[in-house]
Amino acid sequence: MNSETVKVGMVGLGLVANSHFKGYATHQHAQVVAVCDTDRTRAEAFAAKHGIANVYTSYEEMLQKADIDIVDIATPTFLHIPMTKKAAEAGKHIHCEKPFCRSIAEGQEACQAVRRRGVKLVVGETYVFIASHLKARQLIEEGAIGRPLQIRQRHGPWLRRKSKSGGRTSAKRRSAPGWRMDGEKSGGGDYPWIFDHAVHFFATAEFFMLDRKIAEVYAVVGTCQRQSEKEQAQGSTYSLPEVDIPIITWKYEDTDCQGVWLRAERLNGKYDYMHGFSTAIIGARGMIEVLGEGGHNLLWENQQQHLVLHRDGQQTRCFRFDEGGDDIWDSDICYYSQGHINQIHHLIDSILADTEPRYTGVDGVHAVRCTLATILSAREGRPIQLHEIPADYTAY
Ligand SMILES: NC(=O)c1ccc[n+]([C@@H]2O[C@H](COP(=O)([O-])OP(=O)(O)OC[C@H]3O[C@@H](n4cnc5c(N)ncnc54)[C@H](O)[C@@H]3O)[C@@H](O)[C@H]2O)c1
């Protein structure tokens, strides 16, 4: 691409759009020139705040009229695929939020459209772009823990940053419109929270396993019987308290390797001292503990750390990534902000250098396949092989 500045049109101006905008605004070769949201007031306010001239309430009109090279899609999940296909057909490069699709077939169709038109697509898998996770991957690649063999992901509560009045509110709940709880629009059927988030967990599980692929998934289902705990669950996140998957286990194609994700979030009244997402990667000669989205309280010798490297027979090493904290969570890890900035810079750099981006539509579809296997496993009470999932299977 020869043009000095890559021009961007953003569609969907809700919770995550602010982080996306920062990504474009901080890249010297990018500029947001158009925005679109069906909520005109929201679109106009966003445009006024950021000095953007062109405001649309119709996506098709933006594609047709705006002079743009990239479309940034941050709309509800059911719109990702139709919008990606239209953008590809219009010859635009694409940044599309996760979960990329609701079925394997629709995701593959969009990937074909992207290939046919020769445009670039990055799916918004921010977990493989945050500093702490990138450092963990680098250490693993360098052989710091030997061969990685087991992944243990732990999911404590995501706590919102304190407001000026001192209280906390859940970002997702606060801004949660109908689509997040709608089985079809979210894509998750009875498991909207799992569908929205598990793609992150599976992407991370393979990233830390040096891209070894997951082959089989098993979901442990939990229930919530006590009324008081049910009420607490309802107040904390957009999950149905009656149906919950607090534990997911998986095996990789390499049968020496396995993984587990466990949640003790406040869902269903549980308590966990360690906040947010964190992972222990167990290798043949050492282990890494690392914080992810909203992470806090990883302690080593009473000091808060972001990554701790233990090696057999060697001194423990600790790392911190102080990038200004998070825009939303009470956490030192800069997920909402620098994580998204890294991801968007990567897309722009890939476009300018004409190189294949790191997390594409194919990766996005694979993460959805793992998530659909989780939901099918919960329904059938048995381990599910990834190849068992029919291309047209949906969770709703
Ligand atoms: N990568 C991440 O860390 C991350 C974080 C948050 C959200 N997300 C994903 O981003 C997507 C958006 O999430 P959100 O929390 O910002 O949602 P949101 O509900 O806060 O915002 C969605 C916006 O899309 C607009 N919209 C709906 N239909 C539209 C249409 N047809 N045309 C134009 N605009 C339309 C809505 O008016 C709203 O402003 C979801 O798929 C979510 O899973 C990803």
Image (spheres, helix red, strand yellow):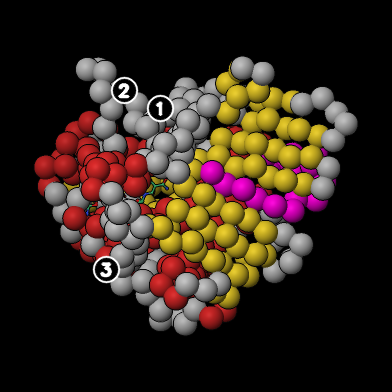
Q: Residue at point 34% right, 47% down?
A: 268
Q: Residue at point 56% right, 35% down?
A: 291
Disc number for residue 184: 3
Amino acid carrying label 2: it is Lys
Disc number for residue 330: 1
- Which tag, 1 or 3, sits closer to the chain's start? 3
Amino acid carrying label 1: it is Asp
The residue lying toward the viewer, choosing from 372 and 112, is 372
Q: Residue at point 46% right, 81% down?
A: 391
Region in magenta: 136-154
What is the spatial separation of the Cα atoms under label 1 and label 3, in whole angstroms? 31 Å
Secondary structure type for disc 3: helix
Residue 336: image location, x then y, percent: 41, 36
Task: Please identify the quarter of the rendering in which residue 174 is found.
Answer: top left
Secondary structure type for disc 2: loop
What is the spatial separation of the Cα atoms under label 2 and label 3, in whole angstroms? 33 Å
Q: Mark 2 points at which residue?
A: 162
